[in-house]
Image (cartoon, rainbow, N blue to C red):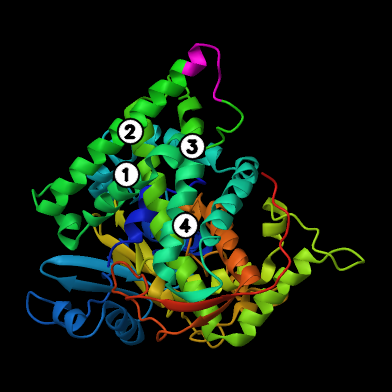
Amino acid sequence: MEGHHTATLADTWLTATMAIAVLPIVSVLILTATKIGRTIVGVAPPKRKGPPVAEGAPLLGVLPAILTRSLQDVICDQHSKLGSVFTLSSLGVKVTFLVGPEVSAHFFHAAESDISVGDVYKVTVPIFGKGVGYDVDHDTRNEQHRFFADTLRPAKLRSHASLMVREVEEYFARWGQSGTVDLKQEVENVLLLIASRCLLGKEVRDHMHDEVSSLLRELIGGLHLVSLFFPYLPTPAHRRRDRARARLEEIFSGIARLRRSSSSAGRGAGDDDHDMLQGLLDSRYRDGRGTTEAEVTGLLVALLFAGHHTSATVTTWTAARLLRHAEWLHAATEEQRRLLQRNDQNEATAVIDYDVLLRMDVLHRCVKEALRLHPVTPMILRRARRPFTVRAQDGAEYEVPEGRMLASPLVVNNLLQGIYREPDVFDPDRFAAGREEDRVGGDLAYTSFGAGKHACMGEGYAYLQIKVILSHLLRNFELQLVSPFPETENMISMRPKGEVMVSYRRRPLLQPAVVH
C-alpha cells in the first residue's frame, strides 16, 4: 500500500513540538501454539495484566513530579523502577511508555488499523488546513505522502543542492570580516531563505519572502500547550494563526493560478522551477485528479512545519557541539579541506554539489550524534486501536488495552547504555564503519527520524540543507562559542534555550566553485 514506507509530515511536526510495543515473530508463534494447545485441552488462556503504573498523587498522578523536575527525569526514573514497559497516569489520562528497540516493533511497524498515527494528530488540521493530512481518509493521505516522496527523491534533491548553496553563500556574504552573532537566529533566517527558494519558488523568494516569513512565524507562534487539547479555542494566538493560514493560502493559490495559466498558454513552468510547489502542482491522484490550490497550500505548510523548525534546531545544536568539542571541530574542518583539495597541485577544484555533500561523512556523523543527544522531540506518540500484547525485556507480558495512548521516548531511547557506549558523551565515531552502534542495536535502535511505516521521508532533505550551512561556515570562518553551552528550552520545543552567541572571523580558505 502506498505510504507504508513514507513518513507523515504531521508526525514530524507534532512530535517536534510536544512534551512501543512489540511481539516478536517467535513470540507470536509461541503464543499462538500455546493458545491452540490450551484450546485443545479445553483450558482458557489466562488474562494478562496491564503494564505497571507509576505511583503518584491521587488524581494528579505524576504531574507534580513532572512540574517540579522534568518529564525526562520522570521517564528515566520509572524506566529504572518498572522496566521497559510502564504507564504514567495524570488527571485520568494514561500513557503507556515502551522503552528500547526490543519493545518497539509493533509500535513502528503495525498497520494503521492497529496502531494509529492519525488519531493522535488531528490537532494539525487548523495548521495544515482542510483536505490534507489528518483531515482526509487513510487512502487519500497515503496518496499525498506519495506526492511528498516524489518531490523529495534524490533526483530532485540534486537540483536543490545548488540552490541551497547559492542561498547560503549569499546570506553569509553579508557577514563582515569579524563579529558576534546569535547563531540560532542566523540559522533560522538562512533556512527560511532556502525554504523560499526550494519549497515555495522564486515568486516568493524574489517578491514575498519577508511577508511569507512573517506569516510562518505567526503560524508557528499559534502553537501552545493549550493547542494540543483545544486547537480551535478562540485565543488571540489561534486567531493570528488562522489569519496567517488564510493569507498563506491566498498567496500560494495566486502563484498556483499564474503557473497553471502560463502552462496552459504553452509557456511552461521554466527551467528554474524545480521547487516543490511545482512538484505538488504537477502531482496527480490515481484517479487522474490533479491537486487543488487549497491542497497544495496545505501540503506546502506541512513541508515547512516538518522541515524548518527541526532543521534549525538540529543545525544549531550541531554547531554548538562542534564548538564545544575542539577535536571534532578540527576533524570536520579538515574534512572540508580534503574534499576541496583533490588534484596533484593541491588546488581547490571541487564543486560543492549533491555528490560532494554526500561525501561529508564526518560532518554527517556529527549531525547524527547531535540529533541523538538533542532530539527534536521528546517522544513519538501513537494510539492503540486494538489491544495487543507486549513482552518486556524481563520476559513479563502485558496486555495494552484498546484506546491507550502510546509513547516511544527518544529522550530515553537515545541514551540507553545497552546500545550506546558512554551515551552521555558526544562521540560521532559511534556511527563510524566498524562500530555502528545504532545498527548493532537493530533497526529500531536509532529512531530520531522515526522508523518503519512512518520513517521520515524528509531525512535526506534535512541532512542536505544542514550540511550545506555547516560546511560553508566551517570552510569560511573561525568560530567560537562565546555564550555558555545552551540548555534545552523545554520538553516541548527541545530548541537551544536563549541566544547562542558565536564570534566569527573570516578565514583565508580557498573557495570552491559553485554551479549556478
Q: Name the residue under label 2.
A: 251
Which of the pair 289/278 is nearer the observer? 278
Q: Distance between the residues labelled 4 and 1?
A: 15 Å
The furthest residue to the front: 177
> In the displayed structure, does residue 504 sit left or right of residue 16?
right
**In terms of image quadrants, where is residue 484?**
bottom left
Amino acid identity at mark 3: Lys
Q: Is residue 301 magenta?
A: no
Q: Distance between the residues labelled 2 and 1?
A: 10 Å
Q: Earlier in the sequence, mark 2 or mark 4?
A: 4
Q: Distance between the residues labelled 3 and 2?
A: 13 Å
Amino acid identity at mark 2: Ile
Q: Which of marks 2 and 1 is nearer the N terminus?
A: 1
Amino acid identity at mark 1: Glu
Q: Mark 3 points at which residue?
A: 202
Marks 1/3 in contact by CB < 8 Å: the verdict is no
* Label 2 crowd bin: few (<14), some (14–19), many (20+), radius 10 Å: some
Q: How far apart are marks 3 and 4 (CA)?
A: 15 Å
Q: Which of marks 1 and 3 is nearer the N terminus?
A: 3
Q: Is residue 133 above or below residue 433?
A: above
* Label 3 crowd bin: few (<14), some (14–19), many (20+), radius 10 Å: some
Which of the pair 49/501 is nearer the observer? 501
Magenta segment range?
A: 262-269
